[in-house]
Image (cartoon, rainbow, N blue to C red):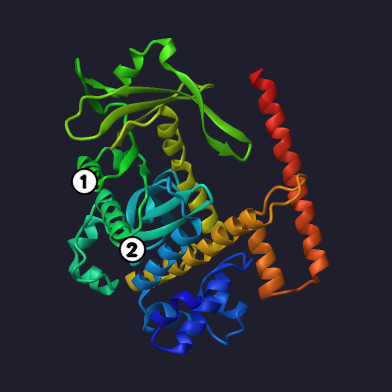
Amino acid sequence: MGRMAGRFARVEPRRRAGRLVQGLLSDLPRKNCWTIAEWAGEATPHGMQHLLCRASWDADAVRDDVRDYVVEHLHDEMAVLVFDETGDVKKGTHTVGVQRQYTGTAGRIENSQVAVYLVYAGLRGHAAVDRELYIPRSWNTDPDRCQAAGIPEERAFATKPELATAMIERFLDAGHRAAWVAGDEVYGGNPKLRSALEACGLGYVLAVACSAEVATGAGKFRADALAGKLPRRAWQKLSAGAGAKGHRFYDWAVIDTADPGSGHRQLLIRRNRHTGELAYYRCHSPQTVPLTTLVRVAGSRWRVEETFQSGKGLAGLDEHQVRRFASWTRWVTLAMLAHAFLAVVRADEHGRTPGPADLIPLTCNEIQRLFITLVVQPFHDAAHRLGWSTWRRRHQARARTSHYRRQAVSQT
C-alpha cells in the first residue's frame, strides 16, 4: 500500500483503502462495502462507499502502480501478455455497462456486465495489470443513461479488440516489454488488432475460428480445410503446460502462411488427443521460432482463466455491488492489487524457501488463509493454523502424485 500512498489526497481514504484491500483478501463469504466495513470494524458502510464514489484519489494511477509492482516482481524476458474478457451477471438496467449480452461466465446470453483484462503471465506467476469496462453501443447512444452512470463524456464506443489495443499500448508506453501476446477468437479475428501488435514488434498467438481464411502459396483456404490436408507425420505431441492433474498434452501442427507483411507468419493447429477436436491460431513472430515456443505461448492462454478464477474467488473481483463507472473502476483496481499481492508473495516464497518434497508449494489460496489468520485477524494460535496448512498441502501433494502416476500409466 505504501507504493501508492501518494495517489490519495488525504490520509483517511488512504488508510481506508488499505482496510478495503485487507477485506478483499479476507475469508468473508460475500465481499461488498457492507460486509467489509463490518469486518474492518467500521460502524457503517458509508466510509467504504465514499472511498469508491467520491473520495479524491486516482484509480488509473493506482492501476499503473499495480502494473509496475507485478512486472517488477514477476519479471520474465519471455512473458506473455494475455487479454480476455469476463462477465458478471447483474440484475436491472442501471448498473454501468449492463445489457443482455454473451458472457463466458454463464456460458450464454445474460443480463451482464463485461470487462476486458490484460494479464501478465511469466514463469514466476501471473496477475492482471490492466482493465477496461466494455460499454455496449446501446449505452453510447443514450447520453442520459451514460451521465447517470458517471461514464466520462469523452468515452466513445470501443470494441473489445480496441480496448485490448489500448491496454497493450499503455503497457508499452510505461516502458515495459513482453515477448508475446495471446488471446481468444474475439481478438484473433480482428485484423486491426493484429496489425497494431505487429507495428509494436510483438509476437502473437491468437485463436481464430475454423472458418478463418488463411493465405498459402497455393491460394486461400479455410483453416479447417488446411487441417484436413495434413499428413499424419505433421503432428507432434507436445505439452501446453502443466495443470493441476499433470501436463496438458495435445497434438500440434504448424503451417507457414503467405499473408503479406514482415515477420514470420504461421497457422498453428491443436488437436485434442481424446476427442479429436481442433483449435486454430494465427501466429506472428519477428523472427523464426520453434514449434515448442508457439505451443508455450498458446498454453499461456489458460493463465487468464486462472487469474479470473483466483481474482474472483480470493479477491472479490466480481463481487462489487456498485452502479457507477468510477466506483467499478476503483473496486476492480483494488481487487487487482489484492490478487497481485498474493501472486507476488507466492512467487517470492517459491524462489526463496522451496518446501519439502511431501508438500506442494504454497498456493495463493493457502497464502490468503495464512495472511488473514496470522497477520490480519488471528482467531486461533499459529500452531493450529500452521498444522492445518501442512495437512492441506500434504493432502494436495498426495493427490497430485496420484494424478501424475495415473497419467504415466495411461500413456505407456
Please tell me whether mark 1 sits on a helix, a strand or a loop: helix
Q: Are marks 2 and 1 in contact (CB under 8 Å)?
A: no
Where is mark 1, residue-wise? 199
Alpha carbon separation for disc pair 2 and 1 = 39 Å
Q: Position of residue 370 (x, y in %)?
A: 69, 65
- In the image, residue 57 above or below residue 223: below
Q: Position of residue 9 (x, y in %)?
A: 38, 87
Q: Position of residue 88 (x, y in %)?
A: 43, 56
- The answer to whether residue 328 shows anywhere in this view is no
Q: Position of residue 63 (x, y in %)?
A: 39, 67
Estimate how packed mark 2 is, as few (under 14), some (14 to 19) or many (20 or more) residues with alpha carbons within 10 Å: some
Dot label at residue 312: none
Residue at 51% x, 84% y: name it. Answer: 15
Residue 28 image-quadrant placement: bottom right
Residue at 54% x, 55% y: name it. Answer: 310
Q: From the viewer's perspective, is 392 left or right of 274?
A: right
Figure disc tally? 2
Q: From the viewer's perspective, is 20 left or right of 368?
A: left
- Give the mark nearest the N terminus, 2 or 1: 2
Residue at 33% x, 65% y: name it. Answer: 96
**Which circle, 2 or 1, is nearer the viewer?**
1
Amino acid under label 2?
Answer: Thr
Dot label at residue 93: 2
Estimate how packed mark 1 is, as few (under 14), some (14 to 19) or many (20 or more) residues with alpha carbons within 10 Å: few
Residue 39 image-quadrant placement: bottom right
Where, quadrant-wise, is the C terminus in this rendering? top right
Amino acid under label 1?
Answer: Ala
Please tell me whether mark 2 sits on a helix, a strand or a loop: loop
- The answer to whether residue 92 shows anywhere in this view is yes
